[in-house]
Image (spheres, helix red, strand yellow):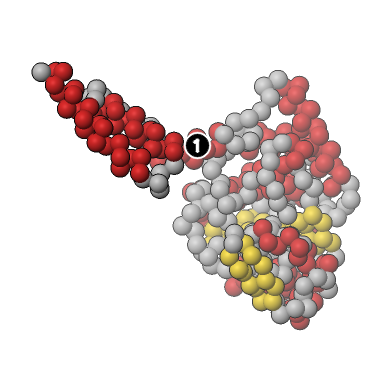
């Protein structure tokens, strides 16, 4: 009886050969795989099921971050080697401080700032900041805020609140404001009262000392417009993210024209700039009169040195200090 069943199943298997072999849409390896599966099922009664491992949605960001270069998950355990990396970063920080472009109102050494940054950054709760500031920007935001020690910090574009939290850790006594057209992604409850769901341009600030105020633009809005707004409100010290020169605009959509375009006097006399991003054509209009007016206000334009490369924690940025 069993032999008869096997014989019948064997005939079924033979009958299945033809459609599998004649299916030219399948690669050769796929056809061989199907033949083996048919033989096991129809001749021997063995059926193989592929079981996919399931992971909860909540676990995915954490697992993803563990495979990325990040000080929270990837670091030397020996304090001697940790200190060597921190000293290299402190030297990079010192080189910026020694230029005197941005005044210092803190007596903290660069090394102590770097050590504090690593301690705070590696213990942060918001570890998945996709589309926000990564290690490179986080380092400079914290470093500059610590040694400049502003009394007022303003952000335009807060996303999940990672940079807001970091700036608060650097300057807990500073008055802090954050602006975004949507706060739906904001994840720092203790700072929510200082966040405003609106563009910063329409906000009236209490009186402040321009020499002790810092504004960080990470909102992908026209840099010329932001510089003129900052000037009108009394700000002098600005940090811009997403500030590529005109020949590197293709990689993302920054505020056009960028501060780099303004100081280089490139592309700002055109009425538009066009490029292709991820296969899609992009066009942004330019107001030449506005661009020239903003350019004439810039006294200092300094792209901050790369720290993602030297540390091997990766990331790229065009974080730039501008003084008007």
Please identify the residue farthest to the left as the structure is shown: 1
Q: Residue at x 82, y 56 (%)?
A: 302
Which residue has dot 1 on it?
A: 62
Q: Is residue 181 above or below residue 56?
A: below
Q: Residue at x 55, y 37 (%)?
A: 65
Q: Is residue 32 above or below residue 194?
A: above
Q: Residue at x 44, y 38 (%)?
A: 28
Q: Is residue 186 above or below residue 285?
A: above
Quadrant, the N terminus = top left
Circle 1 packing at 10 Å, graded few (<14), some (14-19), many (20+), is few
Q: Is residue 8 above or below residue 203?
A: above
Q: Residue at x 73, y 47 (%)?
A: 140
- Camera-side residue of 38 and 243: 38
Q: Position of residue 44 (x, y in %)?
A: 24, 22
Q: Position of residue 146 (x, y in %)?
A: 73, 45
Viewed as shown, does residue 48 lie left or right of 302? left
Q: Position of residue 78 (x, y in %)?
A: 70, 20
Q: How many marks?
A: 1
- Camera-side residue of 308 and 236: 308
Res. 187 visible in picture:
yes
């Amino acid at each position: 009886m069993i032999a008869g069943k096997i014989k019948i199943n064997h005939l079924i298997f033979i009958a299945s050969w033809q459609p599998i072999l004649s299916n030219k849409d399948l690669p050769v390896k796929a056809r061989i795989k199907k033949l083996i599966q048919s033989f096991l099922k129809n001749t021997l009664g063995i059926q193989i099921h592929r079981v996919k491992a399931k992971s909860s949605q909540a676990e995915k960001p954490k697992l993803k971050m563990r495979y990325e270069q990040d000080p929270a998950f990837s670091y030397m355990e020996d304090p001697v080697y940790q200190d060597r990396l921190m000293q290299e970063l402190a030297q990079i920080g010192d080189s910026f401080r020694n230029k005197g472009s941005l005044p210092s109102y803190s007596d903290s050494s660069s090394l102590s700032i770097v050590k504090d940054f690593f301690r705070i950054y590696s213990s942060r709760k918001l570890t998945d900041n996709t589309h926000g500031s990564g290690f490179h920007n986080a380092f400079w935001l914290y470093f500059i805020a610590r040694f400049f020690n502003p009394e007022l910090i303003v952000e335009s574009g807060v996303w999940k609140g990672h940079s807001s939290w970091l700036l608060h850790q650097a300057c807990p006594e500073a008055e802090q404001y954050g602006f975004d057209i949507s706060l739906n992604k904001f994840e720092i409850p203790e700072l929510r009262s200082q966040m405003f769901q609106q563009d910063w341009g329409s906000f009236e600030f209490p009186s402040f000392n321009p020499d002790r105020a810092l504004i960080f633009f990470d909102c992908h809005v026209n840099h010329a417009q932001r510089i003129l707004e900052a000037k009108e409100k009394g700000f002098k010290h600005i940090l811009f993210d997403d500030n590529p020169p005109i020949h590197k605009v293709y990689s993302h959509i920054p505020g056009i024209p960028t501060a780099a375009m303004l100081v280089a006097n490139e592309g700002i006399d055109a009425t538009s700039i066009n490029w292709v991003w991820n296969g899609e054509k992009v066009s942004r209009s330019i107001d030449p009169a506005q661009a020239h007016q903003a350019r004439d206000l810039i006294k200092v334009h300094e792209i901050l040195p790369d720290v993602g490369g030297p540390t091997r924690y990766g990331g790229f940025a065009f974080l730039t200090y501008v003084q008007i």
